[in-house]
Every structure is written in C-alpha cells, then in structure tokens.
Amino acid sequence: MTIDAGGAMTDIVSSVAAAHRSSAEVSTPLTTEDEEILSPGALAFVAELERRFGPEIEHLLELRMVRRKRLAAGDSLGFLAETRDVRENDWRVPTAPVDLTQRLVEITGPTDRKIIINALNSGADVFMADFEDATSPTWGNILRGQANLRDAVRGDISHDDAQTGKSYRLASKHATLMVRPRGLHLTERHLTVDGSRSHAALVDFGLFFFHNAAKLVKTGSGPYFYLPKLESHLEARLWNDVFIWAQDALCISHGTVRATVLIETLPAAFETHEILHELREHSAGLNCGRWDYIFSSIKARAHNPHAIYPDRAQVSMTQPNMRAFTRLVVGTCHRRGAHAIGGMSAFIPSGDEAINRRALAQVRADKEREAGEGLDGAWVAHPGLVSVAREAFASRIAGPNQLHTHRDETAPSANELLAVPSGTRTEAGLRTNVRVGIRYLEAWLRGLGAVPLYHIMEDAATAEISRAQVWQWTRWSARLDNGRRVTPQFVEQVIADEMQGIAREVGDARISAGRYAEARALFSECALSHDLEEFLTTIAYERLDG
C-alpha cells in the first residue's frame, strides 16, 4: 500500500479500501467531520496497521503476563544479560530535529480544542497532545481530538466560547506538537478489523499520521510522538517497525518520525539503553514518567510484602529509588546523545494566593532540582507554570539543553532502583486515595480525562496509584501510623465515609446526575479484588459511552 506525500489516496489505496471496506467496521453513526477523519484511505491505513502489527502486540502483552507470573513466583527484575553488549558498546542516536533541540518546558493536556490552542500558545517549547492518561477515550473524544489536531497542524484551529464570549486563535509562533497515543494494552471497540477490536495505539497513531505526517514535513516539522507504558525493548522494536512501515506507505523518509519513550514502568527502567537502540533513527529521548512509574513499581512487586509503599504524597523525586531512576534516565540519554525529560508538575493555580505562592515555590524548587540533576527539560500541566519552569531551567542551563553533560558517576544498580521508599502510611493518605480515586473515576466515566481536584491536575496515572496503593495496603494488612490495620472491612467503611464527604463537597444534585455509584463500585472492585488488576482503565472502559 502506498500513499503519495500529499496524503491523497493512490489507486492502490483505493483498491485496498474497497477490498477491505466490509472488514474495517465502525460501530457508530458518523458526523460529516467524523467521516473526514475516518475516510476510506484512513480506514485502510489503520486496518493495514492492525493486520500487520496487531498479532505482535498480542504476543508482547502475553510476554508481559509471563513476566508478571515469574515475579509473583519470586523472580526479581534486573538488567538483561543477553543485551549487555547494547549497554556497553558505544553508539548514539541521531541529532534531534531543529524544533526538538530545545525542550526546556513541555506542557501536556487532552485534545480538547481550547486546550490545544492554549497549550500551543503557552510559551512552552513542546505541547504533548494526550490521547492516553489525560483523555477519557470516548469515541467522540477520540474523533474530535483527531479533528482538532488536524486543524492545528494546518494552522486554522480556532474556538469561540459561547459561555464567556472569548475567542481563541493559534499564534504564529507556537510550541512544537507531539502526540501520545494510547498504550498497547488498550483496545478500541468502536473500530473493528476483520471482526476483532482494533488496538487503540494503532488507531491513534494511524489516524494522526495519515492525516498530518506529510503536512508536518512540508512545514519543516515532523510527526513526533510520545510512547507510553512500554515494558521492554521488544515493544520499542514493534514501534520502530510501525514507523518504518508507515513512512514507506506515505513515501516519507525513514527517521522523519521521532519518538520519546516514557520510562514509566519499572521493567522498562532496566532496558533504557535497549529501548533507545531499538528505535534507532526514530529516537528522540526518554522521559521520567514519575506517576505511572510509582504505580508500576507497586504493581510489579504486588506479591512482595516487603515492598509496601508509604503515602503517595511522600513518594517524591528525592526518595533514593526515584533519584536513582532520574540518574539512570539522564545517564542513558546523554551517553547516547538523546534528550532526558523530567516529570510532571501537576499543580494548577487557583484563586487562593497563599496556596499559589507555596505551590509555585515548590514547582520552582522541583524544576531547579531536575535541571541540577542534568535533565534537559520537564513537564507542566498548566500554562500558568510555563514561565516558572522556564526560569528554573534557564537559571541552571546555558543553552537549549544539557546533552553535552556527562556525569562521572556510576550507573544505578538494580538494588538502588528497587529500593522501597521510606515514610509513613497514614489514615489521611488512605482517605485521600479513596476520595481522589472515586472522584476521578466518576469524571472519567463522564468523558473527562484530566480533572482538577484539590489544586492538582489528576489523570489516569494518579488514579492508578490511588487504587493500587489501597489494594497493596489491604492485601498485606498494612499498619497505619495510628496503629490501625488496613482490612477490607476498614476500607469499605472508609469508602462509605468518603462518599458522604464527596456528597457534601459537590452537592446532592451532582451526585444524582453524575456517575458516582458506578465510580464507587469500580473503585471498590479494583481496590478489594483478590489480585491486582493490570489497569483500572481497561475495566472502566467497558462502561464508557454507556
């Protein structure tokens, strides 16, 4: 299958689309704009991705389960003996494209129209448009997000807010766009290929690439991606194969795609060199995905009673295991000539000036620490934090990045990466996990993926920490600092108490009109199940669009 660089369908694509029209099925009625996104050529492109790479994704997911069972049986994570040469040999990734040379501040957010405009205009170097943790994957959200990004790439995106009367337009100078597709573990039930659900990662990547790759190249940029939740270099190899095939299909040069991998799973931390190596000319660096990394660290050692974490608020980046994690990412990236990007500052400004002052001081200190540790930039969740983060990095970095910085320190050992954070487990922390988890889930079921709660922008990653931590404490009857044991009965009582507190916060009308009963049931199911569920969102997805 071949498509010309302008994105128009060739006769080959037309024939593929015609041949497979009956086997690439959309299960819902489409608007005119939806039909533009799900054009015959786009559907043929996604269907071919699915046929070529869907089976390999399933194989890789099976390998994840095999490793999980080995860990449950007592195995421990470590650096791979069979890839030692990759870690020890000298090699480097290609130089970054011009518009990815400076990445001091990256802003992230869902693909809502107004948010895209504000993020691109925010003054950040990069905007990561997120189909994953910050987006509730209703079919409408996915299709509207693709349409919004198509308009943004063409420079004609706009939004008029009927409620406020404000108009939003894209500035002539704006951030570089990157896109995060959904993880390999997620499916898209609204688009089936040959009778089976498609893989959500291929849908998100395929639709964006088909509609925008050629246009981005013409404007001097390129199709740039963030890859979430990888657990091995074999998964990076899969993505590299996807990139090669997609570029060939659109007659685009190899290496035009660039991808930054989020190191946000504990298994991936032991394969950072290998992941960069597998992506080869498509590599654009690694990111310290701190929140999912905490969740993954709990999940990977769910069956270890000696790996019980303290309150999530105490698992900061200054904990020894998290500092080792940062050291690993910086050391790997700079040795290989790749950008090392820091984690998310999830604070959002509010109307309380005292809270803002304290929080902004914490954000500044966090970003100065990241710059001091050698990172080339970091994430923020709100335009109001862009200038603070930029000032923090600019005060420590004389130039667009720190790729030239090589630290004379030993790479962290497996024991350092596997160290359990110190701290206390508190009833207040337990209650916060329950309250935030239920409130986030309720919003997610209504189609909201990024939810401001208690001055923090919560997304699926932080919700995963909340429910996994409650599960872990309950599974091992953890003792709180007040002496109380965390039992299923106690958790059920906490859930009941916090539901009453939520009702007081939001009001009975919103409780009745919302999806709080479903959110409570889902949270309880995951927090009190016998085994720790792999992902909260895979279970909740079956109730989405309901």
Image (cartoon, helix red, strand yellow):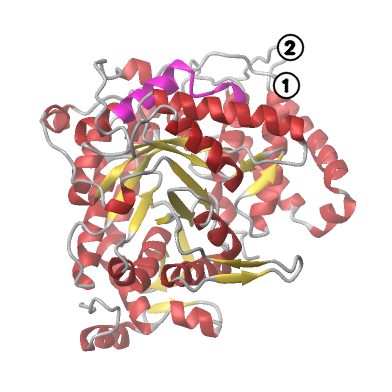
Secondary structure under badge 1? helix
Residue 539 at x, y percent in the picture: 56, 51
Residue 527 at x, y percent in the picture: 62, 36
Q: Is residue 205 magenta?
A: no
The quadrant where residue 335 appears: top left
Is residue 151 placed above or below 354 in the rendered structure?
Answer: below
The quadrant where residue 233 appears: top left
Q: What stretch is highlighted in magenta?
A: 313-330
Q: Residue at x 22, y 79 (%)?
A: 4
Is residue 481 placed above or below 173 in the rendered structure?
Answer: above
Q: Residue at x 36, y 79 (%)?
A: 23
Please name the residue that numbered disc 2 is placed on.
482
The kind of residue tagged 2 is Asn
Q: Which residue is drawn at 57% across and 31% down?
A: 363
Mark 2 nearby-residue class (10 Å; few <14, some 14–19, many ≥20) = few
Q: In this view, does 357 lie to the left or right of 248?
A: right
Residue 497 at x, y percent in the picture: 82, 34
The kind of residue tagged 1 is Glu
Secondary structure under badge 2? loop
Please name the residue that numbered disc 1 is placed on.
427
The quarter in which the N terminus is drawn is bottom left
Q: Which residue occupies the foreground of this view, 283 or 496?
A: 283
Q: Is residue 324 magenta?
A: yes
Residue 458 at x, y percent in the picture: 62, 42
Given contact means CB atoms under 8 Å apart, are the residues at marks 1 and 2 in contact?
A: yes
